[in-house]
Amino acid sequence: AYHGLFKVSGSTFLVFVDYFRATLRVAALSELNRVSYILTHDSIGVGEDGPTHQPVETVSGLRVIPNLDVFRPADAEETVAAMVHSVTHKKGPTALIFSRQNVAQNDDMDYMARREGALKGAYIAKKETEDLDVIIIATGSEVQHALVAAKDMPGARVVSMPCMELYERQSDDYKESVLPSSCTKRVAMEAGVSGLWYKYASKVVGVDRFGFSA
């Protein structure tokens, strides 16, 4: 990775990332590029393995590391975008956070629009059909639930935010187009600790405790 000749990747369960957190931190500090950490079994959805294998706090713990882009894709097209980013980004490594359980595909939206939106860190996954009343922000396997929740709410917008870091690097105009400051009724959803989401939403549906065995 230091030489730059190879695109480097490695994978394990997300909950085990703390075993190599020091090396991941050095990779971020060194801005090692085209380095992909592929981390699976991302939430309390790993029910039968119990709380020791349910990484409720781990994704947020990675998001606070400078120079590390953390992608938690919602479907196959966002996953394509995340993989492309991880092998082309040249200012630090990328952590790819994947679900163990199956997720619904947002096929109501064009596949290229999903890929392009994910490459900006966040995008409108469902646009309101009446005056904007509320924004539901979600990531990963929770996007499918946000889309279901907004189905019968004509004033609801769903924003998929697979990568906070990448979204923050977009222009102010783009960020305002996705999350307009005029709409203060916002709810964020993620199957993990809620703290970081209060930057974007006033209400958060999260998991601020350890899980249980299924």
Image: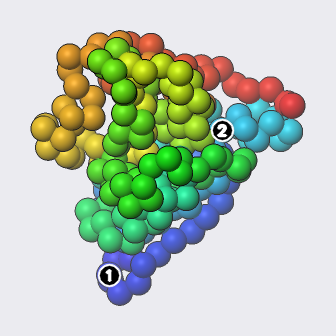
Residue nearest the viewer, comparing 154 with 93 = 154
Residue 98 at x, y percent in the picture: 59, 52
Relative to residue 10, is residue 191 depicted above or below? Answer: above
User: Counting residues from the N terminus, which is met first, the one under dot 2 or under dot 1?
Assistant: 1
Residue 124 at x, y percent in the picture: 35, 39
The reply to whether discs 2 and 1 touch (Cβ–Cβ < 8 Å) is: no
Determine if residue 72 is in view. no
Q: Residues within 10 Å of mark 2 (few under 14, many from 20)?
A: many
In the rendered structure, the answer to whether residue 44 lies left or right of residue 5 reads right
In the rendered structure, the answer to whether residue 116 lies left or right of residue 101 reads left
In the rendered structure, the answer to whether residue 135 lies left or right of residue 143 reads left
Residue for badge 2 = 43
Q: Quadrant of the C terminus?
A: top right
Q: Residues within 10 Å of mark 1 (few under 14, many from 20)?
A: few
Residue 74 at x, y percent in the picture: 53, 47
Which residue is rendered at x = 26% and y = 62% of the image? Answer: 91
Residue nearest the viewer, comparing 91 with 133 = 133
Relative to residue 97, is residue 156 depicted above or below? Answer: above
Residue for badge 1 = 4
